[in-house]
Image (cartoon, rainbow, N blue to C red):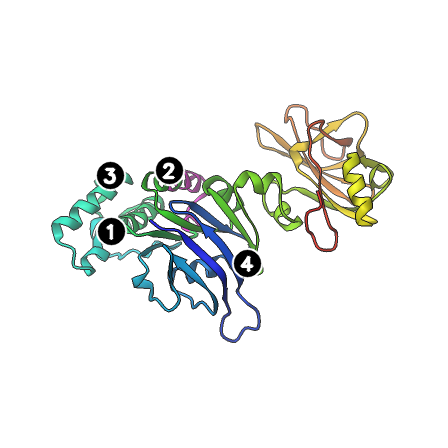
Amino acid sequence: MATITYRNASCIYEGSDKLAVDSLNLEIDDGEFVVLVGPSGSGKSTALRMLAGLEDIDEGSIEIGGKDMTGVASKDRDIAMVFQNYALYPNKTVAENMGFALKLRGVSADERRRKVEDAAKLLDLTEFLDRKPGKLSGGQRQRVAMGRAIVREPQVFCMDEPLSNLDAKLRVQTRTEIAALQRRLGTTTVYVTHDQVEAMTMGDRVAVLRNGQLQQFAAPNDLYDKPANAFVAGFIGSPAMNLVTLPITSDGVQVGDDTLPLERDQLTLLHDAGLQEVTMGIRPEQLEIADSGGMEVVVDLVEDLGSEAYVYTHAGSGVQMVARSNPRTAPKLADTVRLRKRPDGVVHLFNPDTGERLA
């Protein structure tokens, strides 16, 4: 186990004029489970591959356990990779796949078998040790790939979208297993995903990347409750936070003919900043359908999930908003209703030009 430190680490691909990872700074604690998340092209997989030694560090440095990894070959970094495509040998049994790296290291057959059996017990694979990968389900193959990493007893696990090939139900089950297993082993883990729900449910801390740059690095609840900018606010959460840029009035923000009130300290902050418009953010569960107050909207879609419903609406000014509702009392398509902030609802304010958080 080890700490990991990215110090202004940058990577640029040959033939490109844009950094794939731009001056990344992260301090990952010993035994921590950190998730790198972001949209396609954000640099998350490149950052992981830099850590694993599969991509060059063009500027800055990466340290594992206090040792600078610049120029150190991947095989000498004491890390184990788990890939999206499992990368198993089809002609070898589960036990042979799991123990192959140890065999290359010259570990004795008895020691290999002991380590493989211990890992198989952890992963509920004992009965499959003599099977070939082609006889396993996708979830079982992914557990074999995990077992191959575990038997090496590395300082660091690097996981590059390991659940992408699994169906939705199996993804939920397997991510729970991976998170629980990591906590039992206590091995420092860096996990890459494009799925923000996966990131929020698995990571001790989550690093949100965009265009190669770190947007925010925090615990999942902190990302959700206090996003650093409008991008993080819109990326974290499902459905996404409602984000709309609106004119500022003396009492709040203007939506068509209606005014959504803001707190007095928020209005003072906006006045002091000299802004005429502001990007307002509010999460769907912090809006309610009401008989009065708030703003008038027309229902475009009701997404009934059984335990809850999400009501997609638009106002006369073209503003689109999503609100959570009781599915038994949700409005119908094309109904005209009013949306207002719940009494305990939180309104987030962002600079409309930079996207940076104001309040």
Residue at the farthest front position: 66
Residue ID at (82%, 50%): 274
Q: Which residue is mark 1?
A: 98
* Marks 2 and 4, the one that precedes in the sequence: 4
What are the residue bounds of the magenta stretch? 162-178
Work out whether 285 lies above or below 158.
Answer: above
Separation of residues labelled 1 and 2 (CA atoms): 20 Å
Where, quadrant-wise, is the C terminus in this rendering? top right
Residue ID at (44%, 44%): 167
In the image, residue 124 lies in the stretch drawn in magenta: no
Of residues 194 and 33, the one nearer the viewer is 33
In the image, residue 164 lies in the stretch drawn in magenta: yes
Residue 74's x, y, as percent?
A: 33, 63
- Is residue 247 at all visible to an observer of this figure? no
**Residue 42 shows which numbered tag?**
4
Work out whether 243 lies above or below 209.
Answer: above
Of residues 273 and 214, the one nearer the viewer is 273
Separation of residues labelled 3 and 2 (CA atoms): 14 Å
Mark 1 or 2, closer to the camera: 2
Q: Which residue is mark 2?
A: 180
